[in-house]
């Protein structure tokens, strides 16, 4: 019986959940095991040294299954979100509207980044237990090579169209005809 308990404990530590409250200059991180027990909390700066610190701290837990939830996939979360995917970790985008509703139903004493990160960890537990909470976290997949190329080509086309429009506006006089 005792060996079974040890086995279950090892299995639980093999999987961790990470929540990142994204900010423009600093991100707040909370780490829990699969059961929701808080293991670690820390802040990182939004630059390569902060990202290295993030991967070092999360890596210390030695989990094979790492699931990371971030609010604001892309945007301020870049390039951390891409680095998470490159590591082979599962990335989830937090639905901000559902997170806000959750915080209204279960209010905290104050609004802080640390509390928000812990609330995101709670959403992980709820999403695995309650069908209604499943849409609160949406798993993000890595883009294929074709998708990345299409993204590059469409952005390049938009830049070229903007440049051409600016040149044509600058070379021709603007004539506005007013009705009588």
Image (tube, grey):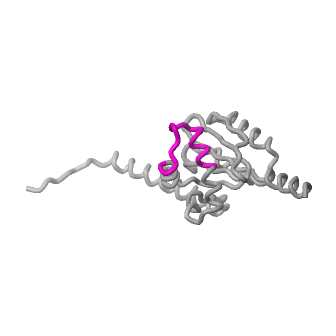
Q: Where is residue 112 in the image (x, y as percent from the top left)?
A: 54, 37
Vertical arrangement, residue 3 with respect to residue 58, above or below: below
Say if residue 85 shows up in the picture. no
Q: Position of residue 87 (x, y in %)?
A: 75, 50
Vertical arrangement, residue 112 with respect to residue 7, above or below: above
- Farthest residue, direction front: 1
The C terminus appears in which quarter of the rendering? bottom left
Question: Seen in the image, is 133 located left or right of residue 178?
Answer: right
- Farthest residue, direction bottom: 131
Residue for point 64% across, 35% down: 43
Q: Is residue 90 magenta?
A: no
Q: Where is residue 108 in the image (x, y as percent from the top left)?
A: 53, 42
Residue for point 88% across, 58% down: 4
Between 142 and 29, the one nearer to me in the picture: 29
The N terminus appears in which quarter of the rendering? bottom right
Please tell me whether the stretch drawn in magenta is mainly helix, strand or loop: helix
Residue 51 image-quadrant placement: top right
What are the residue bounds of the magenta stretch?
104-121
Residue for point 65% across, 40% down: 29
Say if residue 7 shows up in the picture. yes
Between 148 and 137, the one nearer to me in the picture: 137
Question: Seen in the image, is 96 located left or right of residue 48?
Answer: left
């Amino acid at each position: 019986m005792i060996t079974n308990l040890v086995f279950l404990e090892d299995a639980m530590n093999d999987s961790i959940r990470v929540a990142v409250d994204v900010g423009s200059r600093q991100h707040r991180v909370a780490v829990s095991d699969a059961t929701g027990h808080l293991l670690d909390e820390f802040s990182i700066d939004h630059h390569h040294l902060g990202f290295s610190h993030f991967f070092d701290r999360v890596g210390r837990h030695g989990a094979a299954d790492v699931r990371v939830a971030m609010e604001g996939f892309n945007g301020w979360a870049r390039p951390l979100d891409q680095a998470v995917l490159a590591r082979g970790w599962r990335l989830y985008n937090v639905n901000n509207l559902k997170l806000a509703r959750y915080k209204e139903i279960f209010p905290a004493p104050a609004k802080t980044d640390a509390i928000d990160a812990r609330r995101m960890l709670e959403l992980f537990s709820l999403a695995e237990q309650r069908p209604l909470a499943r849409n609160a976290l949406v798993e993000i997949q890595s883009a294929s090579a074709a998708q990345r190329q299409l993204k590059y080509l469409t952005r390049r086309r938009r830049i070229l169209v903007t440049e051409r429009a600016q040149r044509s506006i600058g070379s021709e006089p603007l004539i506005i005809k007013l009705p009588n």
